[in-house]
Amino acid sequence: MKEYKLIFTGTVGAGKTTAIAAVSEVPPILTDVTNNDVEVAKATTTVGFDYGFLTLDNGDRIRLFGTPGQSRFRFVWQIVARGALGIIILIDNSRAEPLSDLSVYLQGFAEELKKVPCVIGVGRTENSSFPTIEDYAKLLESEGYVFPVIPVDVRLRDDVVLLIDVLLSQAEADLS
């Protein structure tokens, strides 16, 4: 049995904890505390990392780690990202500046993104049709990246599995 490590990152409220819970075989281990940030309408927030796992049909296990969303925890991002096979960046399309949000995570994981595949999952597109998926692709291209951008509902297991499948397909292609 092989084990792989995947990272879920993105802004506060983008759905990292929810995505892990949607696919994990066990209830995720959480490091949530009461949210003191009045600008974020959320009762709790992750300050360490979330953890869950998923076993593939061949017996291999994917360890799923979710980072804190706030930039002030960037040091945790770097610790959690060590040894990752890939990164899933979740973006909340209903936020004020989702393209800027994506840029924060591209910069925050710049070193890792030189070495590992990445998928961008854009949530809450039903609440906000701008920016479009094409706008995200243009931003990625302008920053020198070519990553899949997929609209998702992180509450739905199939949507999260799709993100993981796309990421694993990229990793497999890179290994070939």
Image (cartoon, rainbow, N blue to C red):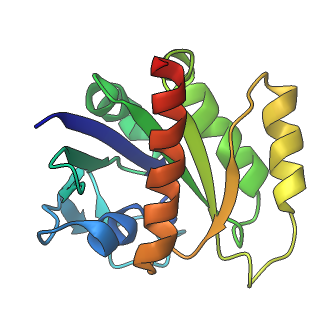
Q: Position of residue 9 (x, y in %)?
A: 45, 47
- In the image, residue 123 above or below residue 176: below
- In the image, residue 98 above or below residue 67: below
x 83%, y 44%: residue: 137
Using the image as rendered, state which of residue 24 and residue 75 is in the foreground. Answer: 24
Number of numbered discs overlaid on the protein picture? 0
- In the image, residue 64 above or below residue 147: below
User: Image check: 134 left or right of 88?
Assistant: right
- In the image, residue 96 above or below residue 110: below
Using the image as rendered, state which of residue 23 and residue 154 is in the foreground. Answer: 23
x 33%, y 65%: residue: 17
User: Image check: 117 left or right of 18?
Assistant: right
Quadrant placement of the N terminus: top left
x 45%, y 19%: residue: 175
Using the image as rendered, state which of residue 46 and residue 85 is in the foreground. Answer: 85
User: Image check: 49 left or right of 38?
Assistant: left
Q: Position of residue 79 (x, y in %)?
A: 27, 26
Residue 18 appears in the picture as rendered = yes
Q: Position of residue 155 (x, y in %)?
A: 44, 80
Q: Position of residue 114 (x, y in %)?
A: 56, 15
Residue 13 appears in the picture as rendered = no
x 49%, y 78%: residue: 41
Quarter of the rendering containing residue 146: top right
